[in-house]
Image: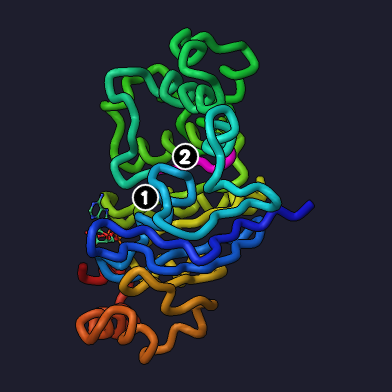
Amino acid sequence: MVDVLRLDNVSRHFGETKAVDRVSLDVQPGQFVGVIGRSGAGKSTMLRLINRLIEPTDGRILFGETEVSALRGRALRAWRRDCAMIFQQFNLVERLDVLTNVLIGRLAERGFLSSMAMHFTDAERTMAIEALDRFDLAPQALQRAGTLSGGQQQRVAIAKALVQQPRIMLADEPIASLDPANATLVMDGLRDINRDEGITVLVNLHTLDTARAYCDRIVAMRGGRIFFDGVAAQLTDDVVRDIYGLEGLREFNEAVTSTQAVHVPG
Ligand SMILES: Nc1ncnc2c1ncn2[C@@H]1O[C@H](COP(=O)(O)OP(=O)(O)OP(=O)(O)O)[C@@H](O)[C@H]1O
């Protein structure tokens, strides 16, 4: 069965602010979707709604036949396992070693009490080492996470998400704190798990050229609404100007003649 992720007229208001405003979106399994837009456009809120970190004010979120926005208890935990999330600030426990941080990803499906036990099987340890190895981080397995570079920490965070064996990976500005070389490693990591495992990726990005380079579909938000939904080639100057305003277009044009990452102003 093909499980489509569907947002059906989803809104999330914070007081007067319509952070996400009547968004409808279908994401097919295996897509690599970049979400772009100015700061405050609603990108983070949309991702957080999908994995139920926050609740919609209105509308429904579906995954195949399952109404995600109605899940509770064990079923909600199972959804959060299916739908892993990584963040700009890595969200690792810095004082714990890298391997333990990855293994914590295995706790996603457990109830609170069994997750307290922090007991892992040999199979889980092997899985965690293999996940680290795919990002060339097996040699760092016993190092404290806080001693790694930002790029390494983000790759550990992806390995941690991977051992959850998710169907969908949500990444909320995963490269915003990284230098270009590390940003490339992290984006390559997301692309590899998308291609090799067929995991659907939804990634919020500030940099337009990154979205162009990696995403087979780009969704642009503006004022909580979906303003553009298409492939990179359809992102003409006019569309970019409308998404970001004139300032963004100037940076975009400069980027065409440079190898620098475009940081679209917030
Ligand atoms: N918890 C909250 N309480 C109140 N307002 C919020 C909350 N979260 C988001 N907002 C508001 O909702 C709007 C959308 O915010 P959101 O973080 O989703 O945008 P974004 O596109 O991800 O921006 P950025 O690129 O800066 O992260 C903004 O106006 C923001 O101030």
Q: Is residue 159 found inside the magenta-colored segment of the image?
A: no
Asked which quadrant contains residue 187, the reply is bottom left
Residue for point 43% across, 18% down: 100
Q: Amino acid at mark 2?
A: Ile
Q: Amino acid at mark 1?
A: Pro
Judging from the image, the colouring scheme is rainbow
Task: Using the image, determine if residue 104 lies above or below residue 32.
Answer: above
The correct choice, above or below, for 168 with respect to 142 in the image is: below
One can see residue 88 in this view: yes
Q: Tell me what residue is drawn at x 38 percent, y 46 percent.
A: 54
Magenta part of the chain: 82-86
The x, y position of residue 88, in whole percent, is 31, 47
Image quarter for ligand 1: bottom left
Judge: label 1 CB < 8 Å from ligand 1: no
Whether 83 is among the magenta residues is yes
Asked if residue 129 shows in the view, the reply is no
Mark 1 surroundings: few (<14), some (14-19) or many (≥20) residues within 10 A = many
Q: Mark 2 and 1 residues: CB-CB less than 8 Å, in contact?
A: yes
Which residue in the protein does label 1 denote?
174
Q: Is residue 257 above or below residue 14?
A: below
Q: Which residue is mark 2?
A: 158
Question: Residue 200: x and y, percent?
Answer: 59, 53
The residue at 27%/27% (across/down) is: 146
